[in-house]
Structure formats: structure tokens, C-alpha cells
């Protein structure tokens, strides 16, 4: 007869040696009336609300950043998305399993920041916002309270909650808008926050606990995206507005700036109604954008529609046909197309470089094995773009 001790050791062995595999199962130990332990080790029951690989692209990117420097010996980023019973096998030195996702995101963000990798930083923030597995449809995951992230960007974000939970729609929308702010603050594309959305609400009486979900470790893009199962928590316009609130950054002090821009004939024409709203599809942003505002950026009217059409971003390289966003004089500030206003030209140009880098990296990652350029190539391009920005701003 196999002893209880032997079964226990077998259980621990199976769990610990499954770390490198897609984590889909949790050990169940239950007490039977006779007082004997019955181990469902061979069964290894399916984990409820199983979806840890639904956002596989984000998970993989966060894991790459985590492994750059991993002093806490977290075995894989996927463990942070599991319920505590399964997460324990890969938590390393993290003892509060409710904080494993937060600690993983914080370490990944730190590593990516050290490497100057905007795409990696973005992935770490996205990972922090992903929904964790719970034991029941409609059950919220526990918030982390014992671990304080080193990075305030990570500290500002919490995980999505089960869409069937009470008030989940409002909570998840607030989470994704805050995520957009934090991504924008590091120079990433705030619209990437929408990629962290979860599924349609499931039936809280579903005995299987599965709900509306998917879980495919082999889908590099993420089955929630490729199967069109994702529910976006906010609109693109709401994301843009939220990012705009955050993107004053260190430029929050309104200091009058004298903008020296030599107006070309095209920029000084007075009849330019067809160019008045040429801001990358930002419809509705045409208030006050009359012909009289198409002179150089030195006007002090301060209206949002006073941008000129002269692109101050002269960096011309575009891996994957991803160009750096236009930078134009806008009253006494500088506007990065599709992004925010900055008081300083250098900061605006650098933000344009950062946005290009993030979009370039996303395109490289999305290409998978068929990619013709790497994230490292995007980073090298970004370095050249920033060097040119520093040179242009110093003139």
C-alpha cells in the first residue's frame, strides 16, 4: 500500500516539476469522513476560471523582462496570474501569494526601465492589470496590500476583476484608464491599455467555474484577441482623454516659451481650412483653428487649435513603416500628434521617438517568426531619434 507520506511527496514533485509547462491545474487535498487524506493527485483538477494564457503576448513579454534580473527567483510570470494554490509552486521568495502578480510586474518593469525598453515597461504594466484566476465565476481576486512596488507606475495599477462580479464594469474601466495614464507617462502607446480587457460576464451559477474564457499557451497573440473574445473597458477617445490628463509629466508648470520657428510659405498661408484638423484623426479638436492661427507657434492665445502644420520632428527612419508622430507648435506649447502637449520642444520630440519605438516593438512582436526586424532594432532606432531630438532642441 502506498503511504500517505509517499503520496504527499508525489504531489509536491508533480507540482514543482510542472513549472516550465503551461499551468492549468491545481492540487486538491480533501479530508474524508474516516480522517484519511484522499489525494486527487492523478486527477489534478482543472483550475476554475482558467485563463492565465489568454493574453499570451503580454505574458511572454513580461516574462522576458522578468528574467533579465530575477533575484526573487520567480519561476515564470504566469504564476502571478494563477490562484494561490497553484501560484505557490513558482512564487520563489515571494511569500504573500496575493502579491505575486504585483511583485512580478514591478521586477519586470524595473528591468525594462534599466534597459531603456519602453515596450517591455509597457508589457509589465499591462501584465499588472490582467485578471487573475479565481475559484468561481463572479469571485473577485484579492488585492495586494503587503508589497510596495518600487515603481509608482506599477503601484498605481490593480488587476482586472471577474466581469461577473458586482460593479466589475466600472472597476475595470477605472483600471484601464489608469493603466493608459501610466503607459502614456513612460512614452508608450496608451491605447495598449485596452489589450488588457477581459471576457464577457459568465453565469455565476456555472458549476464548472469556467465562465466565458479561453486559455491557449500556443497562441502567441493571445486567444482572447485572436478569437475576438475581449471586451474593451473604454473607448479609444476615453483612453486618449485619460492619457492627456497624465501627460503633462514634468511639464506641469506653465512657463511662457518663446518659440523660434522659421515660417515657410506653406505655414504662413492664411487660407488653410482643409489643414485645420490634420492631427492624425483626432476629430473634434478643431476649436479655434482658423486661418489666423496658422502662423508660427509664438501666438499666446493658448487655444488647443492653434497648432501649425510645420512638422518639427525631422527624424526620418521608420522600421516597419512606423514613423515618429508629427510634432507641431501649438500656442506656447508643442503637440505630439495623437498624444499630448509639452512646454519643452525636446520633451515633445523625445515623446515622439518613444511612441514610435513602442509601436515599432509592438509590430515586431506581432510578426512572430516572420519578423524582419527585432525589438532591439527598434531600440537602436529610438536611440538615434532621441540623439537627433537633443541636437535639434539645443539649436
Image (cartoon, rainbow, N blue to C red):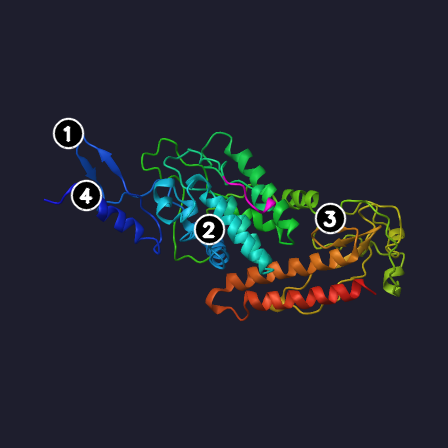
- Nearer the camera: disc 1 or disc 4: 4
| Pointer 3 local density, CA inside 10 Å: few below 14, some 14–19, many at least 20 | few
Tell me which corner region of the image, top left, top right, bottom left or bottom right, holds residue 284.
top right
- Nearer the camera: disc 2 or disc 1: 1
Quick check: marks 1 and 3 in contact, CB under 8 Å?
no
Labels 2 and 3: the sequence-earlier one = 2
Quick check: marks 2 and 3 in contact, CB under 8 Å?
no
State left or right for residue 53 relative to residue 242. left
> Disc 1 to disc 3, how far (Cα)?
66 Å
Q: Against 134, is 351 above or below?
A: below
> Disc 2 to disc 1, how far (Cα)?
44 Å
Q: Against 200, is 293 above or below?
A: below
- Picture coordinates of residue 372, whole percent (x, y): 53, 71
> Disc 2 to disc 3, how far (Cα)?
32 Å
| Pointer 4 local density, CA inside 10 Å: few below 14, some 14–19, many at least 20 | few
Q: Secondary structure at mark 4?
A: helix
Q: Which residue is mark 4?
A: 5
Q: Which residue is mark 3?
A: 250
Tell me which corner region of the image, top left, top right, bottom left or bottom right, holds residue 392.
bottom right
Disc ID at residue 374:
none
Disc ID at residue 55:
2
Q: Residue furthest bottom?
A: 372
Residue 53 appears in the picture as rendered: no
> Disc 4 to disc 2, how far (Cα)?
38 Å
Q: Residue at x 36, y 44 (%)?
A: 88
Bounds of the magenta segment: 147-152
Residue 241 appears in the picture as rendered: yes
Q: Which residue is mark 1?
A: 34
- Picture coordinates of residue 74, whole percent (x, y): 42, 51
Amino acid at each position: 500500500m502506498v503511504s500517505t507520506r509517499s503520496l504527499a511527496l508525489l504531489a509536491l514533485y508533480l507540482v514543482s516539476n510542472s513549472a516550465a509547462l503551461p499551468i492549468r491545474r491545481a492540487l486538491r487535498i480533501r479530508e474524508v469522513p474516516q480522517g484519511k487524506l484522499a489525494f486527487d493527485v492523478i486527477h489534478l483538477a482543472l483550475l476554475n476560471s482558467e485563463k492565465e494564457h489568454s493574453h499570451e503576448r503580454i505574458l511572454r513579454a513580461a516574462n522576458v523582462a522578468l528574467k533579465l534580473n530575477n533575484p526573487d527567483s520567480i519561476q515564470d510570470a504566469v504564476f502571478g496570474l494563477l490562484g494561490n494554490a497553484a501560484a505557490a509552486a513558482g512564487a520563489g521568495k515571494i511569500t504573500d501569494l496575493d502579491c505575486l502578480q504585483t511583485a512580478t510586474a514591478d521586477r519586470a518593469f524595473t528591468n525594462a526601465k534599466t534597459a531603456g525598453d519602453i515596450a517591455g515597461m509597457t508589457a509589465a504594466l499591462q501584465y499588472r492589470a490582467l485578471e487573475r484566476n479565481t475559484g468561481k465565476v463572479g469571485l473577485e481576486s484579492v488585492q495586494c496590500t503587503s508589497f510596495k512596488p518600487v515603481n509608482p507606475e506599477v503601484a498605481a495599477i490593480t488587476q482586472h476583476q471577474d466581469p461577473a462580479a458586482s460593479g466589475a464594469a466600472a472597476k475595470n474601466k477605472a483600471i484601464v484608464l489608469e493603466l493608459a495614464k501610466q503607459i502614456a507617462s513612460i512614452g508608450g502607446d496608451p491605447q495598449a491599455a485596452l489589450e488588457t480587457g477581459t471576457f464577457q460576464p459568465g453565469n455565476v451559477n456555472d458549476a464548472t467555474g469556467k465562465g466565458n474564457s479561453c486559455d491557449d499557451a500556443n497562441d502567441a497573440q493571445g486567444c482572447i484577441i485572436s478569437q475576438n473574445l475581449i471586451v474593451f473597458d473604454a473607448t479609444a477617445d476615453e483612453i486618449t482623454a485619460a492619457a492627456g490628463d497624465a501627460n503633462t509629466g514634468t511639464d506641469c508648470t506653465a512657463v511662457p516659451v518663446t518659440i523660434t520657428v522659421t515660417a515657410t510659405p506653406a505655414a504662413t498661408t492664411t487660407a488653410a481650412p482643409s489643414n485645420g484638423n490634420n492631427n492624425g484623426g483626432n476629430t473634434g479638436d478643431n476649436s479655434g483653428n482658423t486661418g489666423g492661427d496658422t502662423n508660427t507657434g509664438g501666438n499666446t492665445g493658448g487655444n488647443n487649435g492653434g497648432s501649425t502644420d510645420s512638422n518639427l520632428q525631422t527624424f526620418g527612419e521608420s522600421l516597419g513603416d512606423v514613423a515618429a508622430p508629427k510634432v507641431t507648435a501649438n500656442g506656447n506649447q508643442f503637440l505630439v500628434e495623437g498624444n499630448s502637449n509639452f512646454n519643452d520642444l525636446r520633451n515633445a520630440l523625445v515623446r515622439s521617438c518613444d511612441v514610435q519605438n513602442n509601436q515599432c516593438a509592438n509590430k515586431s512582436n506581432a510578426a512572430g517568426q516572420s519578423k524582419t526586424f527585432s525589438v532591439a532594432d527598434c531600440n537602436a532606432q529610438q536611440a538615434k531619434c532621441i540623439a537627433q531630438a537633443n541636437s535639434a532642441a539645443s539649436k
